[in-house]
Image: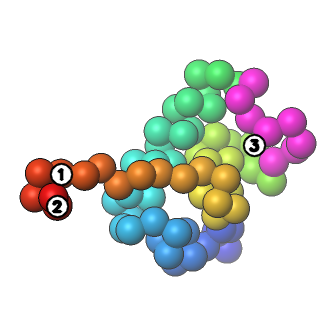
Amino acid sequence: MIFPSIDKLVEKVESKYTLVTLAAKRARGLREVEKDAKADEPESKKFVGIALNEIMEDDLKYEKPVSATDE
């Protein structure tokens, strides 16, 4: 079983594509600066797992960019 659940993660963001992009960017940031990980032991030792847990716990947020068509 995958934790956190993909279905629950998609509820936190607007689409599965946003979820993938957000998690990938955060995982790259964690990889580049390993000290950026939380001081307490995360459930996952992989950077993508840490990023997904942060999204699930609302520790990682994003802003939807405003395009010219949205205004």
Q: Residue shown at 86%/36% (left/top)? A: 39
Residue toward you, 4 or 67: 67
Q: Which residue is mark 3?
A: 45
Residues at badges 2 and 3 in contact (C-beta under 8 Å)?
no
Residue 23 lies, in percent from the top left, at 51, 49
In the picture provided, is 67 more to the left or to the right than 28?
A: left
For marks 2 and 3, the one nearer the N-term is 3
The quarter of the image holding the C terminus is bottom left
Q: Residue shown at 60%/57% (left/top)? A: 55
In the picture provided, is 4 more to the left or to the right than 23?
A: right
| 23 in relation to 69, above or below | above
- In the image, the segment drawn in magenta is 35-42
In the picture provided, is 39 more to the left or to the right than 48?
A: right
Q: Which mark is residue 58?
A: none
Mark 2 neighbour density, 10 Å: few (under 14) some (14–19) many (20 or more)? few
Residue toward you, 68 or 47: 68
Q: Which residue is mark 2?
A: 70
Q: Which residue is mark 1?
A: 67
Residues at badges 2 and 1 in contact (C-beta under 8 Å)?
yes
Q: Amino acid at mark 3?
A: Lys
Residue 3 lies, in percent from the top left, at 68, 67
Residue 11 lies, in percent from the top left, at 50, 75
- Could you tell me if residue 10 is visible in this image? yes
Q: Amino acid at mark 2?
A: Asp
